[in-house]
Amino acid sequence: MKTLIPNMITCGNMLSGMLSLVLAFHGHFVPASWLVFFAVFFDFMDGKMARKLGGSSSFGMELDSLADVVSFGVAPAMIIYSVYLKGFFGVTGAIVAAFFALCGALRLARFNVHHVDGSFQGLPIPAGGHFLVSFVVAGISLLLGPVRRWLFGRWLARAGLIQGNAGTRFLGPWNLAALAADAPASTVHPLALDWHDDAALDAALAGAVALHGPIVLAVVWIHGGAPAAPLAVARHVGAPGRRADYYHVLSSAAADPARPDAGRLARFAALPGLRYHEVILGFVREPAGSRWLTNAEIAAGVLAAIEAGAPRFVVGIVAPWENRP
């Protein structure tokens, strides 16, 4: 019993990590991130209970390390990959996320066989995992922040702020106000929604248009995990007798010559009063080789696309296609 109770608490740590992965797989990134924070409670309590009951064991130590790899290594890496890296940096994003989990596992393995007395060496994996998911919980955008601020500065009469959990970030009601602070409160109308819920998305956008007026300019960058969402948003852009601009930010895959998507242009062209603009995020060719766009280059490129107003705008280059990173 002395060892069973601490080990059951450790299993709670691993269960939190597994549930976090399941939620991330279904696109619920903020709840998945909160489960990583919740896992630290079990990680703290198992050791405290083991010391109190005198039930420390080698089995418990190994189980604790395995649970930590899942909850503070694999789960945060998957969340960060899904929210910030997937679809925009190709295999590089997957490697970066996997590298974090790998380093966490190596650190745990090292200190399981090489005990060091005194202060910590390096960054403990719970702290590293919490640092990553805190970006998601806080609703921090690493990509289009400058674009948002430009829109607020130019369209001071009325600006909309729509966030969803299939885009580059998810923002709940508790932190939408933080982004709204980029402009006077009277000009910003935050709206939290779920890109995966078609009915809720349609109702929320219709309600926002009815309350605040038509959308005349939309910059839309939605994760590929919600393929129907961009067109659903487009149906609510514009108004009878008034044309509107819709800037659709797409990953470099949209320029893949082996996978053309002529149907996308036709679907948006069928919407009356909508001027559809493709903004394709390419790559940069340098003497040492090719690389993906930086966050600053993406934001600057999207702003340049809006200023140009062209039907198709490529940030960076997409040809020759075989030179992509």
Image: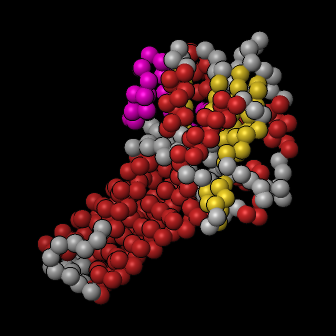
**In the drawing, does residue 133 fall left or right of residue 96?**
left
Nearer to me, 251 or 150? 150
Question: Where is residue 41, by image quadrant?
Answer: bottom left
Nearer to me, 302 or 50? 302
Q: Position of residue 229 (x, y in %)?
A: 67, 39
Q: Which colour assignment does the render follow?
A: secondary structure
Question: Where is residue 291, by image quadrant?
Answer: bottom right
- The structure residue drawn at horizontal position 45% and vertical position 37%, both measured from the top left corner, is 172
- The structure residue drawn at horizontal position 55% and vertical position 27%, both measured from the top left corner, is 151
Q: Position of residue 42 (x, y in %)?
A: 29, 63
- Look at the picture and state if 75 lies above or below 304: below
Outermost residue toward the front? 287
- The structure residue drawn at horizontal position 69% and vertical position 37%, both measured from the top left corner, is 248
Inspect this view and state whether residue 5 appears: no
**In the drawing, does residue 218 fall left or right of residue 113?**
right
- Look at the picture and state if 214 lies above or below 318: above
Question: Where is residue 306, by image quadrant?
Answer: top right
Inspect this view and state whether residue 92 appears: yes
- The structure residue drawn at horizontal position 16% and vertical position 80%, both measured from the top left corner, is 117
Q: Is residue 200 magenta?
A: yes
Q: Quadrant of the N terminus?
A: bottom left
Q: How many marks?
A: 0
Q: Position of residue 286 (x, y in %)?
A: 64, 61
- Look at the picture and state if 288 lies above or below 110: above
- Look at the picture and state if 78 lies above or below 157: below
Q: Is residue 228 magenta?
A: no
Outermost residue toward the top? 241
Q: Quadrant of the C terminus?
A: bottom right
Q: Position of residue 115 (x, y in %)?
A: 23, 84
Magenta-colored span: 173-201
